[in-house]
Amino acid sequence: MIKVVDVVYHHHSEFNKPLQVLEKHAPSLGFADFIQQSIQFIFVKHLDYNGIEYINGKAYAFFRSSNKFWHIPFKTHRYIKSQHPDIVLVEGLVFPLQLISLKWTMGKNCRIIVQHHGEKPFEGIKGFLQKMADRNINAYLFTSYRNAAAWINKKIIRNPYKCKEVLEASTNFIRKDKLKSQARLGMSGTHNFLWVGRLNKNKDPLTVLKAFK
């Protein structure tokens, strides 16, 4: 069975209980329930708590850390190495120093995959470190190849074939009765418009509304 460690370097200092961070990350954890017969997942999170927990048959490791760019969580890396994973999945492209340290700790036999979550490439020394980190990354996961363009154009990602298209989260939504749902929500129009993105300037909602009009 393949063993995968999924690590989130971001430190949730506002949380001190495992279930708090698991609730926040729920959309990106649901997929594991459907493939745990063939892939063993261990999830690593950072918050104001230390401990190993087993929840619904899956292992979660929690560590205290820091969100400072130069901070390297050596305790986390020692734990990941002790698990002897085949693959480490790093959530986010904005932890190049941590990723380089992780590769040094794990050695050449461990493959590292990094998943994009909307981050933009760094400039200056941080951007240089992202270029260095690319040498240690076997594959990137992007929602769309177009999201990888900025990283490829800046030559942070030197090999575009390492970029793969994968949705960044899953859902446990199930289909409901349409008429009952409309009654519950008070929707009575013939045409109803549901906005599921962030309602801000970046998403340009006015253009979408003009298109519907």
Image (cartoon, rainbow, N blue to C red):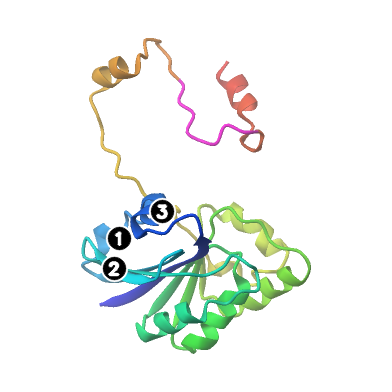
Where does residue 165 sit, x and y in percent of width and height? Answer: 48, 57
Q: Check disc 2 and give the amino acid type.
A: Glu
Does 213 sit above or below residue 155? Answer: above
- Identify the residue at horizontal 67%, vertical 64% (top origin): 152
Residue occupied by mark 2: 53
Q: Is residue 182 magenta?
A: no
Relative to 210, is 26 on the left or the right?
Answer: left
Q: CA distance from mark 3 to mark 1?
A: 13 Å
Q: Looking at the image, tell me whether mark 2 or mark 1 is earlier in sequence order.
A: 1
Image coordinates of residue 7 in percent, x first then y, are 44, 68
Q: Quadrant of the N terminus?
A: bottom left
Disc 1 crowd rating (10 Å Cα; few below 14, some 14-19, many 20+) is: some
Of the numbered discs in the image, which one, if any, rests on residue 179? none
On screen, residue 206 above or below 188 = below
Q: Position of residue 129 (x, y in %)?
A: 69, 74
Q: CA distance from mark 2 to mark 1?
A: 16 Å
Residue corresponding to mark 1: 32
The reply to whether residue 131 is in sight is yes
Which one is in front in this view, the residue at disc 2 or the one at disc 3?
A: 2
- Secondary structure under tag 2 reads strand
Name the amino acid, label 3.
His
Is residue 141 shown to the viewer in this render?
Answer: no
Disc 3: which residue: 25
Do callouts 2 and 3 mark residues in contact (Cβ within 8 Å)? no
Q: Nearer the viewer, residue 159 or 84?
A: 84
